[in-house]
Amino acid sequence: MTATPTRYDVTREQLTELLAGTPRYRVDQVWSGLYTRLGEPESWTDLPKSLRTDLAELLPPALTSVTESVSDKGDTVKFLWELEGGSRIETVLMLYRDRATVCISSQAGCAMACGFCATGQAGFTRHLTPGEIVEQVVRATERARALDRRVSNVVFMGMGEPMANEAAVWAAVERIHADLGLSARHITISTVGIIPGIRKLATRPLPVNLAVSLHAANDALRDELVPINRRYPIDALVDACREYLGARNRRISFEWAMIDGVNDRDSDARELAAVCRRLRPAAHVNLIPLNPTPGYPTRGSSLKRVHDFRDELERLGANATVRQNRGTDIDAACGQLAAGQPVTVGISTPRKAPTGTD
Ligand code: SAH
């Protein structure tokens, strides 16, 4: 972290201190510049020139743009950023007819070591600060505005495990909610299944959506696909999900990346449906055909198999949808975010069970 707090890391109190001697209404203007007008302080022309110059120095941005890639006829934009210290992260903006979603990163890299995920293959570098998380939303919002669009949803489905960086993620959620004005119902936190994180989230004051990356509904297979399962096995995970439902009265979604011949069999559908029944009626399954990554040789299921699996789940009483895939050609799809880090080809079985804390 930098000695000077970055632009979106400063709290309102810190901003007041940084601008000591500046009238209160000016501090308010700066705050609304940061969270409402957006863009560079230089462009906030209702502020005196000298203050704008000071701000550029006092509030350095955390994200330096490295590249921006566009696909899906302009409807998907992937941002690659460099952070203080040199690590890199990615953010994805997805424009749909009725909404615009930003997919943000919570860590540079990831320690969870899921073998099929490019971020997992790259390993962990560091946690992001709240400001580094919030600034991703701000920068994507600026891009959306330039296209006459408004960001409506934020999903913590980029690089990293949000529940291994819960405090910073929560501070960012509060800022996104209170200052950027997104409702908690439009914010989704996706976790690999870190039970203490889910429990903590249940005590937080805003009812955000919870998504759990399940991918297997028996411990032997999940131990292999999602190594943290050795620490937080399925039964205990489902209990934590029930507690979250009880506390929140919101739907939980399970993510299931469909891997050819691995977790797309009829027996997998039966096991998954049984888990969903334990959370009835409030569990929903999102099916995604596995996206290709350099370090995992197994293919995604065919679209036909994905749809048949969905039908089978529905027949067994579980709700399921097939998630639309975005940005595969620019490596912006689920599990493909690697921020240009070299990926070792050939890693398919994860090493030891990762710890939940880093
Ligand atoms: N660490 C969090 C956030 C990552 S979200 C989590 O595990 O939930 C990204 C989602 O994409 C997760 O459900 C993840 O399991 C899934 N994913 C990872 N690699 C994938 C791949 N190659 N194809 C499809 N989905 C993948």
Image: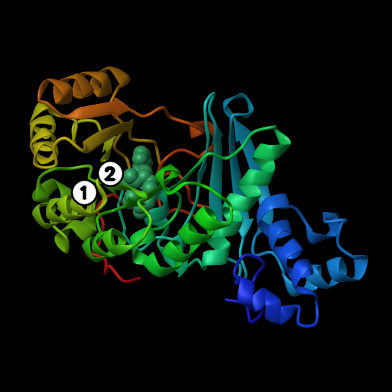
Q: Is residue 93 above or below residue 306?
A: below
Kind of residue at badge 1: Leu
> Given contact means CB atoms under 8 Å apart, are the residues at marks 1 and 2 in contact?
yes
What is the CA distance from the residue labelled 1 to the residue labelled 2? 6 Å
Is 238 positioned to the left or the right of 210 in the image?
Answer: left
Q: Quadrant of the C terminus?
A: bottom left
The residue wearing badge 2 is 250
Q: Is residue 81 above or below residue 268?
A: below
Label 2: element kind? loop
The residue at 16%/60% (across/down) is 232
Residue closest to the eye, 104 or 17 = 17
Q: Is residue 258 above or below residue 219?
A: above
Label 1: element kind? helix
In the displayed image of the protein, which residue is found farthest to the right? 49
Residue 5, visible in the rendered structure: no
Name the spot of residue 217 as percent of width and height, x first: 13, 43
Name the spot of residue 281 as percent of width and height, x first: 16, 35
Residue 87 appears in which quarter of the rendering? bottom right
Is 178 positioned to the left or the right of 37 in the image?
Answer: left
